Each structure stands twice: as structure tokens, then as C-alpha cells.
Amino acid sequence: MISGLGLGGLIVLVLDIWALISVVGSNASTGSKLIWVLVILLLPVIGFIAWLIFGPRAARG
């Protein structure tokens, strides 16, 4: 059974992976992508929230 903290960590991990995939697939410049990836990796919760509000989105095909 997954504890509350473990479940929260798992949710944050999944959301961060989703954000990273979206950043890498976006039309943003390489430098911008690198900065967003670092922010999301170094500050998982705050970085994800910042990406939701300000970050680049994946290109729609």
C-alpha cells in the first residue's frame, strides 16, 4: 500500500515528467527549453506550477 507521502511524490513525478515532455516538444528556443528543464528538475513542485502558468507548451501537430 502506498502511503500519502509516497502517493504525493508519485503524482509530482508524473506531473513533472509530463511538463518535461511538453517543454522538450515545444517550439521554444533551445536556451529557453534548457532553463525550463532545469527549473522543473531542481524545484519540482514550484517549477511545475511556474511552467503551468508561464511555460512553453508542446507544439500541436
Image (tube, rainbow, N blue to C red):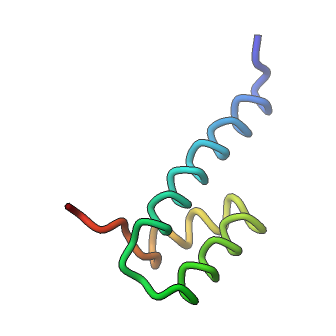
Of 59 and 3, nearer the camera is 59
Q: Is residue 26 left or right of residue 34?
A: left
Please state the horizontal and vertical placement of residue 54, each as a whole percent of the image. 46, 79
Q: Is residue 31 above or below residue 40?
A: below
Q: Residue at position x 48%, y 68% from top? A: 23
| Placement of 38 over or under 7, stated as above or below | below
Residue 14 location, x and y as percent?
Answer: 59, 42
- Residue drawn where x is 46% and y is 88% of the image: 29
Residue 26: image quadrant is: bottom left
Residue 11 placement (x, y as % from top left): 62, 38
Residue 1 occupies quadrant: top right
Query: Which quadrant of the rendered structure holds the C terminus?
Result: bottom left
Q: Position of residue 18 (x, y in %)?
A: 51, 51
- Residue 6 is left or right of residue 48, and the answer is right
Based on the displayed image, in which of its 4 quarters is residue 31 positioned? Answer: bottom right
Query: At 42% from the left edge and 76% from the top edge, which residue is drawn?
Result: 56
- Numbered-mark total: 0
- Residue at position x 46%, y 76% from top? 55
- Is 61 situated left or right of 30 in this image? left
Q: Is residue 27 left or right of residue 43?
A: left
Q: Which residue is situated farthest in the left direction here?
A: 61
Q: Is residue 56 above or below residue 31?
A: above
